[in-house]
Amino acid sequence: MYRLLMYIGMILGGYIGWWAGDYVGLGLMSTFLVSTFGSMAGLYMAWRITTDYLE
């Protein structure tokens, strides 16, 4: 369950980051960078949820 939530958090965070970068009108590399930060944020949120509520 832990790894599944991490995976889902990374996917959702990356998608939101990609959407935000594209919405603002950044270039391809800048949008990719925002998506990377979104993936890391999603990973952190999933980690916090699993450690606070599932353990």
Image (tube, grey):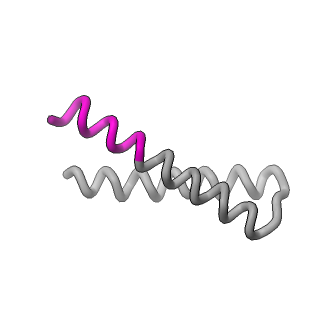
Count numbered badges in the picture: 0
The residue sitting at 63% across, 52% down in the picture is 17
Q: Position of residue 44 (x, y in %)?
A: 41, 44
Q: Position of residue 9 (x, y in %)?
A: 41, 50
Is residue 36 shown left or right of residue 7?
A: right
The residue sitting at 32% across, 43% down in the picture is 47
The residue sitting at 78% across, 52% down in the picture is 23
Q: Residue furthest top?
A: 52
Q: Magenta segment: does it hold 18?
A: no
Q: Position of residue 36 (x, y in %)?
A: 57, 59
The residue sitting at 76% across, 69% down in the picture is 28
Q: Is residue 42 above or below residue 22?
A: above
Q: Position of residue 11 (x, y in %)?
A: 46, 58
Classified by dominant secondary structure, the portion drawn in magenta counts as helix
Where are the magenta residues, as a range? 44-55
Is residue 49 shown left or right of residue 13?
A: left
Q: Residue furthest left?
A: 55
Figure quadrant of residue 22:
bottom right
Is residue 19 shown left or right of residue 55?
A: right
Quadrant showing the C terminus: top left
